[in-house]
Image (cartoon, grey):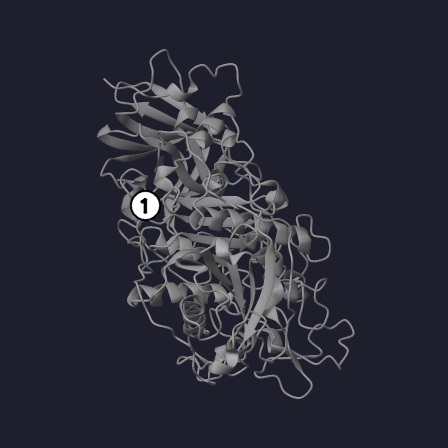
Amino acid sequence: MKKPALALLSGLAGLATSGRVAAAEPDALGGFAVVRNDYSFGDAAFFPQSLGAPVELRAVIHSPQDLGAGPFPLIIVLHGRHVTCYDPGIPNNGDPFANVTLEWPCTGNRQPIPSRLGYEYWAENLASHGYIVASIGANGINAADDSIEDGGAQARAELIEAHLELWQAFNTTDEYGTTFNGSVDLDNVGLVGHSRGGEGVAAFIALAAERDLPYTVGAALLLAPTDFNRALVVGVPLGVMLPYCDGDVFDLQGVHYYDDSRYALSGDPAPKYVFEMAGSNHNFYNTVWSPTSFGAGGAVDDFAALEEFVGVDPVCGGNGGSSRLTEAQQQTSFVAYANGFFRTHLGDEDQFVEFLRGAAPPPGGAAAAAVRTSYMSPDLADERLVVNRVATMDSLQTNDLGAAVQATQLGGYALCGVGPGGGIQGFEHCVEDPGTFEGDPFEGRQPHVPGLAQLRLGFGRSASWINELPQGTDVSEFSALQFRAAVDFVAPQFVDDDAEFTVVLVDRSGVRASAGVEAWSERLSPPAGGLYPIVPKLLLHGIRIPIAAFVSDGAAQLDLTDLASIELVFDAGPGAILLSDLGFVDALPIDPGTTGTGASEGGGMTTTGDDDGGQADTSTGIDPTTVAPGTVGTGEAEGTSTAAADGRDDGCGCRGGRDRPSWWALVVVCLATVRRRSLRHGPVQPKRSEN
């Protein structure tokens, strides 16, 4: 009988048997010299059909200076909701909202607040690796989006489409000059949306799936996003970045993009990630929203502003909270993860796969953010074997493989987050007292239902949760066992300490192999904060244990080709956890891999052009005067757009990554065994965080 079991560990007995190793540094500058340009077609150049108000068509661009080395992937960045205009003649005297308004276009002496410029620190870096990054303005939408039901999501999707139509013309025609002719890879587009911009990105992905567009979205990163509409993001590699100390979208509702989408499309070839960033707030990712970087008006530490209404928190507090990051630290952590994400999923590089999945610690640039990751592999036979997703009350007795589930001496064993059938009927919150904020039920994570189905496990010193497996369950070609978990801080069994337990694999002949959870993940600790229901927050984190980490308890070798059960053994003391998504993930690589091409030439950075204002800008060689107000240059559509592009069904989700599996990464792992609402947010909207 084939018994590959733990072959990777042979000969490594003298080395460390637990732990994770540091990742590559994705935020180092690349080899391309970078040039900065911008374009503007005026404050009222575009009228989204869903908005009924004029919107600017304006962007700041960072690109490799040598465009002849392309074509390069294109990244569109869309900021969120923020005040739109400031009056430089009115001193704010320490009040960031004294001289700002929410209007469009700006009137009188007021000037536009250039929110689109707030991500230049990242755009310059990514462009040095061979990308074109265009950060677009959306002040016109911000001034009008509270008047429509979806909070401006569809209007933002239309705005993204309008800019992509321009880039199609820039790339293929001489209508606006020839600067970017042939330099843009529109089959390899990345999207970034911050706050309500994230919801706009999600809406555009849904829109693109319904249309035959001449560009293809290859990856989407949602930064502190709102999720008013519960849109599904499928067929596209998805990253959701959640700042733990968010004082604006304080419920971190954006986690629903991951939760709702992870099983939504059968055969979905795209991986999904959640990156929880400790000590990070909502605004500091954008320098124009950050008070140290932009003093003209409207910039604020959002968690400090929230504290004016709900009290002071010792962890996230804006004035010396114990975990808080500076503006620079928060922005550096974003560069590290945004670069790693796009260089993996658009740039064919594989050296960042392990930290993106949570299999390696955060890179140095993000170390201060103590990033916690959840990862869902593609829904392909060799990439994911779901054992128990925990979806309905039936999951407590029978798992997704149709085998029995047993609970032994558990003090708590129940389903929460959804009703017994998985919907809202009979819904039960995962906390006893969800609390309220502005009239919304709130449980530290989500104000609206259904939420995430979670299994509540309360235990003493001799309890277990066992999932039996059908005859012939072969996991020998998977890389890791994985699930999501968090300390259940309201359960009767809760103790204010780390939850420690062991995972045991048992084969059909009774051989047992075990691994301690604490050796292969960040500590499963009670969530931080003392200002409930704002913090602590209830968020599940990925627990990932390499198959090679399981060490046989006896002389016989574990037979991975016929496992009989998975056991979670709670024998280290009392405690309580919440859990979901138990399964095996990621095809075991076969051949040593190589990295992608990355940067290839040049060095340093050069910049040209400035911002801003409402004037036409021709610094790119693009002639905006050829576009009449209310219209957008379209170019001639060609090709097709599909949510799931060929060549991305590869485990890392990299384009063409099947040819470059990250074998080396597995070996390395084995070796290391309320706020100013009148201006900033507009009228109170039930069940809606506002940025």
Q: Quadrant of residue 294?
A: bottom right
How far across and down, in percent of the image, does residue 569 sit? 41, 29
| Nearer-the-camera pick, 587 or 305 | 587
Is the N terminus in the top left, top right, bottom left or bottom right quadrant? Answer: top left
Q: Is residue 487 visible?
A: no
Q: Amino acid at mark 1?
A: Asp
Q: Quadrant of residue 228?
A: bottom left
Q: Residue furthest top?
A: 555
| 648, above or below 667, in the image | below
How far across and down, in percent of the image, does residue 553 sit? 40, 16
| Nearer-the-camera pick, 637 or 227 | 637
Q: Is residue 248 left or right of residue 326?
A: left
| 137, above or below 519, in the image | below
- At label 1, counting other C-alpha atoms closer than 10 Å, the crowd grade (few under 14, some 14-19, many 20 or more) is many
Residue at position x 39%, y 42% in the image? 652
Q: Is residue 47 visible?
A: yes
Q: Which residue is mark 1?
A: 649
| Nearer-the-camera pick, 463 or 348 | 348
| 184, above or below 150, in the image | above
Indicate the secondary structure of the residue bearing disc 1: loop
Is the C terminus in the top left, top right, bottom left or bottom right quadrant? Answer: bottom right
